[in-house]
Amino acid sequence: MKICTYNVNSIRARLTLLLDWLRHRGDDIDILCLQELKTVDEGFPLDEFRALGYHCELYGQKAFNGVAICSRLPIVSVKKGFSDAEWDKQRRIMEVGLGGAADGITVVNVYAPHGGERGSEKFDYKQGWYGRFRSYLSGIAHDTAFVAGDFNVARYETDVYDPVALKDAIGTMHEERRAFEDIIECGFTDVYGHLYPGKRQFTWWAYGAAIWKDQGMRIDYVLASAQALKITKDIGVDLWPRRKKTPTPSDHAPLNVEVEV
């Protein structure tokens, strides 16, 4: 089974490229976690994904945020948001339980807040959101759970192309990194960091020439609980859709994890 996380930066803007990429891969992605849909549920292109054999669960939001999980495997349970009206004003998280060959596996799709400069309202919101997210994850840490998405934090200095120039930039501040470590410490492993320790591999690059100079950041992750890590085989970033010039790509690349079920 292959699980993919991909911040598409608008599903409608990226649809042609996304469908081309799935066909390019030979339709080998079983679970597709999409972030930053920037559309309400009614605006999601369900017919195109159904034609590729996916059932999609949606948690969209107009113009901002929004997540979806598209699966070729049976989905037996769905949870959208934190079940907290205040925190769910921004639609950023969805959880599904899988059936069939993947029975007992939980997949959580997350789009963490971007944040802002230290002391700003957006900075405080991001810190508070991470605290709420940690409480949420502590409840599934003993399950066979994968948590995939855009976390908007570069975990280590090696996860940015220039740690000196980007010191204290959004995504590298020590408070943000501490918040990320807090969720790791409640029972999860950064799969890429575990399988490829010390290897520099980015998942996001600003628009323009950054992708060709590899001036990026690693801010997209798949986290695995202890039980999930036992069945995790490999993980990798697929640069093919990010390097396309037309149609215009997302600023992120897909991150794919291979799981044995």
Image: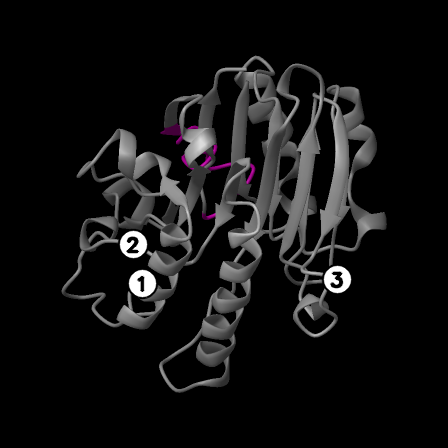
Question: Compared to 120, does 221 lie above or below?
Answer: above
Task: Identify the magenta region.
Answer: 236-251
Foreground tag (2 vs 3): 2
Q: Nearer the viewer, residue 236 or 185?
A: 185
Q: Amino acid at mark 1?
A: Arg
Instruction: Give residue 62's mark.
Output: 3
Instruction: Give residue 234's mark.
Output: none
| First reached walking from the N terminus: tag 1 or tag 3 | 3
Q: Amino acid at mark 3?
A: Lys
User: Which residue is situated farthest in the left direction here?
Assistant: 164
Q: Residue 62: name its quadrant.
A: bottom right
Point out residue 208 in the picture as x, y percentages from the top left corner: 37, 51
Residue at 61% over, 28% down: 31
Determine whether label 1 and label 2 are within 8 Å by CB.
yes
- Give the main secondary structure of the magenta stretch: loop
Residue at 33% over, 57% down: 181
Q: Which residue is mark 1?
A: 177
Q: Amino acid at mark 2?
A: Arg
Local secondary structure at mark 1: helix
| First reached walking from the N terminus: tag 1 or tag 2 | 2
Q: Which residue is mark 2?
A: 155
Query: Considering the image in quadrants, where does the N terminus appear?
Result: top right
Local secondary structure at mark 2: loop
